[in-house]
Amino acid sequence: MSIHVHFLSFESSLTNSDAGSNDWKVKQENIFLHHLTLQRWKAVLDVRETKEEILMRFQIPNMTCGGCANRVTNAVHSVDPKAEVKADPVKLTVTVASAEPEHRFVSVLADAGYPPER
């Protein structure tokens, strides 16, 4: 008789880019998929997947108000709902921390009417 068990566990590492700053970012997130087969009290553990999160900054010249910032944030979350987004209409910038590729955010921002400057 065998018992099969599947479960996920998560591990994150943090980085602080500025010495003395309290602004911490997730540098790497490890997602572990465990498959345990218990057979007469023996266990086998396997499979590991890693995703690196990167920090991207976009200049959005026509993001001039809080409503624009909300639409930009919603556009980014349509690509990655778990992305950390900081939209600043005063500085006309949006910062995104995500493991998704940059070109996906550039495309969705342009489609939403907020094309980033290069």
Image (spheres, grey):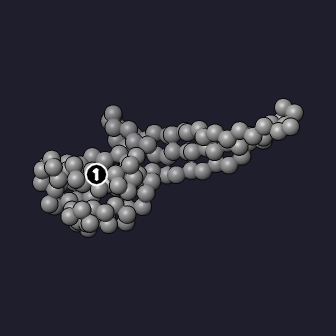
Residue 56 lies in what quarter of the image?
bottom left
Residue 14 lies in what quarter of the image?
top left
Determine the residue located farthest toward the top in the rendered image.
Answer: 41
Residue at 44% across, 43% down:
26
* 90 with respect to 100 (left or right): left
Residue at 45% across, 51% down:
53
* 43 with respect to 51 (left or right): right
Q: 19 above or below 99? A: above
Question: How packed is label 1: few (under 14 Cα within 10 Å), some, or many (20 or more)?
Answer: some
Judge whether residue 98 can be spotted in this image: yes
Residue at 31% across, 47% down:
85
The percent position of residue 81, horizontal first and vertical second, equals 38, 49
Type of residue at label 1? Asn
Between 75 and 19, the one nearer to me in the picture = 75
Residue at 39% across, 52% down:
80
The percent position of residue 110, horizontal first and vertical second, equals 25, 66
Residue holding disc 1: 74
